[in-house]
Every structure is written in C-alpha cells, then in structure tokens.
Amino acid sequence: MKGLLTAAALSLAVSDVSAHYIFEQLTTGGSKHAVYQYIRKNSNYNSPVTDLTSNDLRCNVGASGSGTDTVTVQAGSSFTFTSDTPVYHQGPTSIYLSKAPGSASDYDGSGGWFKIKDWGADFSSGQATWNLGSDYTATIPSCIPAGDYLLRIQQLGIHNPWPAGIPQFYVECAQITVTGGGSANPATVSIPGAFKETDPGYTVNIYTNFHNYTVPGPSVFTCSGNDNGNGGNPPATTTSVKPPASTSTKPPASTSSAPSGGNGCTVAQWAQCGGKDYTGCTVCASGSTCKVTNDYYSQCV
C-alpha cells in the first residue's frame, strides 16, 4: 500500500501546482523581472524539500542554470524575491549568497554559502508573529567581491512540529553578477550540512511554550562584522523590527483526527486537511491521504 501511495503521489505532482508557494520572480534596480527569468526553475513545482542531506536544499529539485539568465546588480543595492502565493506556513525566511568560481549559470552551489538576511519570530506583542507575505526585500552587502553569485531564498515551514512532522524548506536561487563591492571574505557553510535535526530552530514546537526562537543556519554576515539588527540569528526573544505581515503562533484551526468528509472541494498534496476547529476542505486530492500530525494539524501526504 505504501508503494502504491508513493507512486500515486508522484503522479499527482504535475497537477499539484497550487499546494504551497514558490519564489518565482526577482526585482532588481526597481524592475520586476519576468517569472523565472533570473530564478532557476525547479521540477518540484511549489512543493517543499524535506531531506536535510539532499543537494536539492541548495536551489530546489531539478533547478539548474540551464535556460536561466543572469542579472547584474550593484553591491549595496536592494532586491526583492516575490512568491506566486503569499507565504502562509509559520517559520523563518533567510537569504544566502554563494560565490561562483566562474559563471553563475554553470555553478551547482557546491561551494560555500553565507547568510545575509533573516526574518525570524517577533515576540514583542507577547506572542510570536512571522513575516508572512509575498515580497521579501534585502540588500547585497556593499563589501563583498564582484563576480557571479547564486542568490538563495529559503522559507522554513515549521508548522508540523518535529519529530511527528517534518519541517519544510521552500527554496529558490537567482543568478546574479555583482559589480562594485570590496574584498570581504565571509565565513561560509555547506548546503547540505548547514541544517541539522538537532537545531533548536528546526525541532521547536511552536504550539507549546514558544517564547524564543533561533533561526537555523549560520549568523548573518554584515560588512561591519556583526549582525546589524535586521533579524540576525540571536537567541533573543524579540527582533528589532516587527514583521509587516504576520500571524500568531496560535495553532491552526483543525480536528484531532484526520477528517473523512468534505463539502465537495479537495485539498492539494502538502496542504492542511484537518485539525481542531478546522473548517476548510477535508478530502485530499487523488493520490494523497489526510494524515494526523497532532491535535491541531492534519496534512495531505
């Protein structure tokens, strides 16, 4: 039965394009570019990557430089990643860079990565809120060397508490050529390898005694040599800037068991299908099954 479900789930992938969200557009120099013009297109649609040991954690499943253009950006300038659907799973968002040894289009991301931005949890209101939206804007550090880079965005959905559930990585890479800049030499990490099952930001249960949060991965690199207060990776209970679009950590409305009924609508693979007080669709699309994660959340898998 498990094998049959797996095969069915794979066959569903082609039609399962609305299950989640993916970052498909890049804005640089004030211009919002075409979908996937400078962002590597994946073969995973908008489904997450969950294997911490997979090379797919770099830029997503099937994402390569083939057919992707590279855009020129000035060091110190801003950019924006835009998703097809607003991010709705609670969890942090981070931006990474990796310098290519040659052209960005030929680079597989096997070199070192450094983080330049985090959006973590904000506890200033007494409960956690997250930056959940469609647009994520950050700045290319002004001190990094000129050259080709992979610019990576990562949103980590931690709505399914580990170990009963598996956190979900939504990642994409843009190809950029940085001009100007300086001679900084940021410390780097490898992906995969930067995230572990023992990381507090990976294993945390956001529904129980959730009072502080540390974003997984390395600390944020800045030209001043330390976090500039834009999120960073501190174990502090609050961040310096309250996210503009957010949601509380109150568990998603759902039933304690996987529902079997429905109102005629279906839920795509990976989306919520039940939990305490949940009122949405409860029937999973063909090839997936509503599985109970906890009293607050059931998901089509």
Image: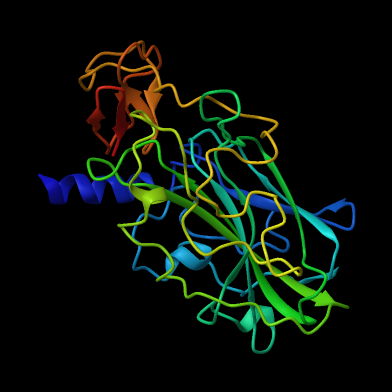
Q: Nearer the viewer, residue 112 or 87?
A: 112
Left/right of residue 112 with respect to residue 260 in the rendered view: right
Q: Quadrant of the C terminus?
A: top left
Left/right of residue 25 with respect to residue 291 in the rendered view: right
Q: Nearer the viewer, residue 16 or 100?
A: 100
Give the residue drawn at x 57%, y 35%: 130
Q: Nearer the viewer, residue 245 or 233?
A: 233
- The image position of residue 264, as x and y in percent, is 36, 14
Give the residue drawn at x 80%, y 75%: 143
57 lies above or below 183: above
Residue 200 visible from this viewpoint: yes
Residue 62 visible from this viewpoint: no
Q: Quadrant of the N terminus?
A: top left
- The image position of residue 167, as x and y in percent, is 37, 47
Give the residue drawn at x 64%, y 89%: 101
Left/right of residue 170 with respect to residue 245 in the rendered view: left
163 lies above or below 29: above
